Image: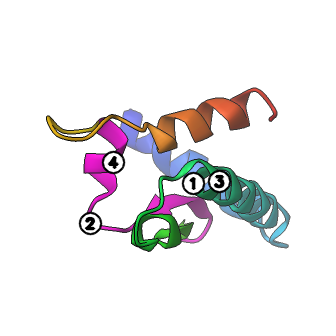
Amino acid sequence: MAAEFIVGLRQHIAEQDSEGNLTDAKVEMAKEGVAIARAKAPVDEGDYRDGIQVGRRGASGVGVEFTDWKSRLIEYGTQETPEYAVAAKTAEQLKQGR
């Protein structure tokens, strides 16, 4: 049942996105998320900040990706470093409409 729902949902999204409008809107929101996240990112050498980018998954999946190897350490912190929670704060700001 759940698998049928997911297949149907993906088909519906593909049909709705036949002209690219939905995906274009997702990309624009992801670009906004990237800008917010980069502004919140701590910068030492810049690798973490520069690794924040728009990512694509499949035909219409779009999101903000954190590609630097230190991303989890910076997001959640370690014993030696504070938790920055850049992804969580970015998501919350996007939900609130900036």
Q: Quadrant of residue 85?
A: top left
Q: Quadrant of the N terminus?
A: top left
The residue under label 1 is 10
Q: Residue furthest left?
A: 79
Q: Quadrant of residue 54?
A: bottom right
Report the Cα–Cα distance between label 3 and label 1.
Answer: 33 Å
Magenta span contains residue 88: no
Tell me the mark number nearer the camera, choosing from 3 and 2: 3
Report the Cα–Cα distance between label 1 and label 2.
Answer: 31 Å
Image coords of residue 28 (percent x, y): 79, 61
Tell me the mark number nearer the camera, choosing from 1 and 2: 2
Residue 77: in sight, yes or no?
Answer: yes
Residue at (47%, 61%) from the top-left corner? 43
Image coords of residue 25 (percent x, y): 81, 59
Q: Would you say the residues marked 3 and 4 are in contact, meaning their CB atoms lie under 8 Å apart? A: no
Q: Nearer the viewer, residue 26 or 59?
A: 26
The residue under label 2 is 69
Image coords of residue 50 (percent x, y): 51, 72
Q: Earlier in the sequence, mark 3 or mark 4?
A: 3
**Mark count:** 4
Residue at (65%, 53%) from the top-left corner? 39
Disc 1 marks a residue whose amino acid type is Arg
Disc 4 marks a residue whose amino acid type is Ile
Residue 57: in sight, yes or no?
Answer: no
Disc 3 marks a residue whose amino acid type is Ala
The residue under label 4 is 74
Q: Would you say the residues marked 1 and 2 are in contact, meaning their CB atoms lie under 8 Å apart? A: no
SS label for mark 4: helix
Span colored in magenta: 57-76
The residue under label 3 is 39
Q: Would you say the residues marked 3 and 2 are in contact, meaning their CB atoms lie under 8 Å apart? A: no
